[in-house]
Amino acid sequence: ALVLEHAGRFTSREQAGLLEQYGIECYTIADADRAVEAIRSAVELNRSLGDLAPLGASLRWMSRMYWWKGDRPQAERAGAEAVAVLERAGDDRLLALALSNQSQLFMLAHRSGQSIAYGERAAALARQVSDAATTSHALTNIGTSQWNAGELTAAKATLDEALRVALEAGDVEDACRAYVNMAWSLLDWFRLDEADEYITAGIRLAEESEFLGFLAYMHVERARLELARGRWDEAALSAELGLDAPIPMRCAALAVLGRTAARRGQPE
């Protein structure tokens, strides 16, 4: 942020890189508004430069950050354009991640068949270029979609592989995401003790790495877990930690608080 106060000292290409990195750090600390603003500026600069690979990469990030902000239509538009741009750029690593981003958007909409198809294409391409992070990202999408489709045994094996690949590569973002998706899926099926193990390990990793966005997600998962166990005080305390988080987590936190208040007969 301090460097960007002197953006005029840098070329347009350098400014685009700085803005993208700043946006990523804002995403990491769960500041969705600043993340979107920064990455949108990076996309505009990259578009003016006409270099397809950086443009496609920044569009993929913009898709992710718009979803984090709660704007799915913009996320879908940016994600689709990222794939279209990178199919012409000749960079298989970036294309694999853009395809996995599409798989992720389909997974989040419970369009399991499309998510798995895109995820498998992304994973195959990522393995060809030895990209562990994108391999993990794609496997997390596939495994979560398998959960959504009721393929529980295959889903858990896929998500465990996604987590292992990310941890072995030292990839904090995708490891946190694998923890979150595994725990969320286990909670949906009321496999509470298993979910507890993943939430505990995930919170430890997110705290140590200061990945505040995913840490908020995990606290909301802890709230869902405590609610399912009938521990209403603990559920409310954990849910309150998600009230300042980006919209996807905040919605779930409010739902837990609302259900807890309803069960206690509280009018609010």
Image: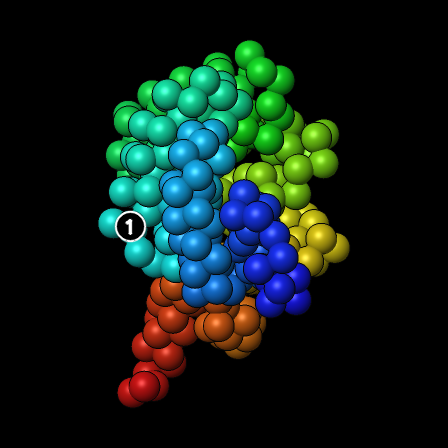
Tell which of 17 and 189 is nearer to you. Answer: 17
Residue 232 at what x, y percent from top left? 48, 73
Q: Residue at x 55, y 12 (%)?
A: 128
Residue designated by label 1: 74
User: Could you tell me which residue is drawn at 37 percent across and 21 percent down?
Assistant: 87
Element class at badge 1: helix
Residue sticking out furthest to the bottom? 267
- The answer to whether residue 135 of the structure is visible from this angle is yes
Residue 159 at x, y = what percent? 53, 31
Relative height, residue 122 to residue 233 (above, below)? above
- Could you tell me if residue 256 is visible in this image? no
Q: Quadrant of the N terminus?
A: bottom right
Of all residues shown, which one is farthest toward the top? 128
**Placement of 91 over or under 31, stated as above or below:** above
Q: Amino acid at mark 1?
A: Gln
Residue 201 drawn at (x, y percent)? 68, 48
- Report the coloring of the rendering: rainbow
Label 1 Cα neighbours within 10 Å, binned few <14 / some 14-19 / many ≥20? some
